[in-house]
Image (cartoon, grey):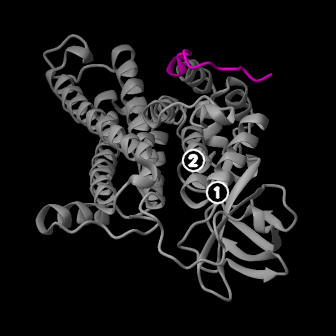
Amino acid sequence: MVTVLKESTDFLAIATTLAEEFAKTAVLRDAKGGTPTEELKKLRESGLLNLVIPKEYGGIGETWPKALKVVREIAKTDGSVGQLLGYHYFNTAIPRFFGTPEQYAEFSTASARHNWFWSDAANPRDPDSILTPDGENFRLNGLKNFATGTKCSDVVIVGGRREDLGNEVYAVIPSDREGLQINDDWNYIGQRQTESGSVAFHNVLIRREEILGNPDSNDPPRPFATLFTPLGQLVFVHLYLGIALGAFAEAKKYTLTHTRPWIISPAETAAQDPYIIEQYGNMWVDLAATISHADHVTLLAQAAWEKGEELTVAERGELAVSVASAKVLSTRVALDVTNKIFEVTGARSAANKYRFDRYWRNVRTHTLHDPVAYKVYEVGNWVLNGQMPNFTLYT
């Protein structure tokens, strides 16, 4: 049974309750990998899947700042489910970016009614997915090496390059469409339950009405459509921040209950050791700065979202730089905190039964999505030369 949520509902409290549930099995599931079936079932039942779908289409109509705080909360205890939920929210918005208003209304209404979970198989780094005209419809053939959540989703965003025109086309299709082969080959050091393995397309039928926008157009995207990239990158920011906050909280709990002071420490307990206190202070300063910046930039993204088709190229460029700076900061801080927790917890905390390393492994794996060095370049080129980033599906 799905919980029907109202605008007055405390969504963050629901996310906190779910996160506490997920924490009970997080260590075991990290070791096991695979699909977080029970956790996704609880997520469906919570009603949170419809959080950002507009009210006029049957959703809750919440803002991106609220939705991404929910993602952050889930990610504190379960980076995999946090990623799946963040991608879901983002994917529900793709018909607004690339489709017609009628398509956005149609897909959103169906999603809210059926409580769909969305995934994607549209990685632009895999150029070998080819879309071929087949009468009024199309056929899709090829491979996407990374396709998060497809195995456990209801619908999937697919992307392919038209064989005849050369333009990139996106469509929304059922995840059980004939010819869509979901490969069980995700075996990475982190984010082990995101089902981010490869997907192959074997003459998959793509109906014309499933294609977002005009499949015959090679026109450059509207400024609002290019908001696609900053919003997707913001999902990453909150994911990394959530994982780092989770690692910090777990380390704090361990330090207060298990860590012993070093043999020459003047302190009676580890929590009174001046060096441990200093490290916690430094970690929290970095986390607090990241929280503040992430929340500020997410408000900017919400303002851009609300502008819709009135968004200008310059406004989009400035937002992209702000998001890039948040991506750089969250990456650095999350990698640092998830590593340093071992310095404040001690040798015994490295035991496999705790799997505290999962926090670092999760951040390290996902931060390889696109090179953070190029985000630094985007920020520097804007600050020094006034050059805004050109739109790509990564910038």
Q: Position of residue 18 (x, y in %)?
A: 60, 23
Disc ID at residue 305: none
Residue at the far right in the pictured view: 178
Query: Is 137 part of what is drawn in magenta?
Result: no
Q: Position of residue 331 (x, y in %)?
A: 34, 49
Kindly check if marks 1 and 2 are in contact, taking CB atoms under 8 A apart as contact.
yes
Disc ID at residue 120: 1
Which of these two is toward me, 212 or 121? 212
Label 2 sits on residue: 87
Q: CA distance from mark 1 to mark 2?
A: 8 Å
Indicate the quadrant where residue 176 lies: bottom right
Instruction: Report whether 92 appears left or right of 175.
Output: left
Amino acid type of the residue tagged 1 in the rendering: Asp
Which of these two is toward me, 204 or 310? 310
Q: Residue at x 23, y 24 (%)?
A: 262
User: SS at mark 2?
Assistant: helix
Q: If you read the primary sequence from the N terminus, does the residue marked by circle 1 or circle 2 appear first?
A: 2
Query: Is 2 part of what is drawn in magenta?
Result: yes
Q: Residue at x 39, y 18 (%)?
A: 253
Q: Residue at x 77, y 47 (%)?
A: 154
- Give the answer, above or below, for where 307 lies relative to 376: above
Q: Position of residue 33 (x, y in %)?
A: 66, 45
Amino acid type of the residue tagged 2 in the rendering: Tyr
Indicate the quadrant where residue 133 lies: bottom right
- Give the answer, above or below, for where 136 lies relative to 88: below
Write the start and end of the magenta stretch as one range: 1-13
- Give the answer, above or below, for where 239 lies relative to 378: above
Which of these two is toward me, 279 or 368? 368
Quadrant assignment for the N terminus: top right
Instruction: Report whether 15 appears left or right of 366.
Output: right
Q: Position of residue 67 (x, y in %)?
A: 50, 33
Indicate the quadrant where residue 6 lies: top right
